[in-house]
Amino acid sequence: MSVPRRFTPQQDGRLLGRFEPIEADLLRLATTQLLEMLDSGTTDPQLAASDGVFGRLLPDAYRDDDEAAAEFRRFTANGLLERKALNAQIVLDSLGASEPDTATPDSGDRQPVVVSIDSDAVQAWLRSLTDLRLTLADRLQISPDGVVHLATEDTPFLRELYEWLGMLQEELVYAIDV
């Protein structure tokens, strides 16, 4: 039995994405939180300079020259953060507004969320999924060798979210590569 594809290419070049309601809600929440974080980094340069997640989102252009790296960041950080926020907003817009859930959680009455993604939006989705994963990697304290160093009660959920976002990214790449 084949597994249904989450992203299906259409004749007009768009992709149709299909999410279970809980998945769409989770992606909306994570993307909204990403937007809030990006906004705080844009409005508070000190936060962006001190929070490790911004180091992952905006890596140093000059690793061996702190002064040149700081100067480069001074001129580029806000523009990059604004573009990342625009990408995240495109994902949110694609998912549509969250509908009030009138069904009981276990009733199964909620219908799958179907999104139509054009070629420009696909790139925004890929970039936002990357940004979400980089943010989670920082929060989980994932080292370059892939080891998670965070040990809290939230770690299992965050790890699963990190892996799920990676799966979405892979499925999206596969859909545009077909």
Image (cartoon, rainbow, N blue to C red):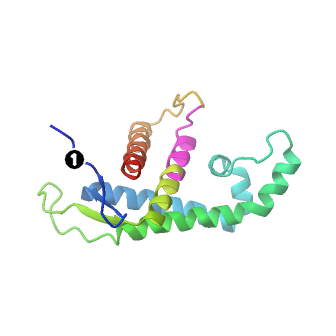
Q: Is residue 1 left or right of residue 20?
A: left
Residue plotted at (36% across, 56% down): 26
Q: Is residue 149 left or right of residue 4?
A: right
Whether the magenta-drawn stretch holds residue 91 is answered as no
Residue 91, quarter of the rendered image: bottom left
Question: What range is drawn magenta here?
Answer: 131-143
Does the rendering let one see residue 33? Answer: no
Q: Residues within 10 Å of mark 1 (few under 14, many from 20)?
A: few
Q: Is residue 14 left or right of residue 64?
A: left
Q: Residue furthest front?
A: 11
Q: Secondary structure at mark 1?
A: loop
Q: Is residue 178 left or right of residue 4?
A: right
Residue 9, quarter of the rendered image: bottom left
Residue 140 or 56: which is nearer the viewer? 56
Residue 123 or 110: which is nearer the viewer? 123
Quarter holding the N terminus is top left
Q: Position of residue 47 (x, y in %)?
A: 69, 57
On screen, 148 above or below 132? above
Whether the magenta-drawn stretch holds residue 132 is answered as yes
Q: Position of residue 39 (x, y in %)?
A: 60, 66
Residue named by callout 1: 4
Residue 125 or 56: which is nearer the viewer? 125
Does the rendering let one see residue 30? Answer: yes
Magenta stretch: dominant SS? helix
Residue plotted at (53% across, 30% down): 146
Residue 17, quarter of the rendered image: bottom left
Residue plotted at (50% across, 63% down): 88
Q: Position of residue 35 (x, y in %)?
A: 53, 64
Residue plotted at (18% across, 57% down): 105
Q: How many marks?
A: 1
Q: Position of residue 83 (x, y in %)?
A: 60, 65
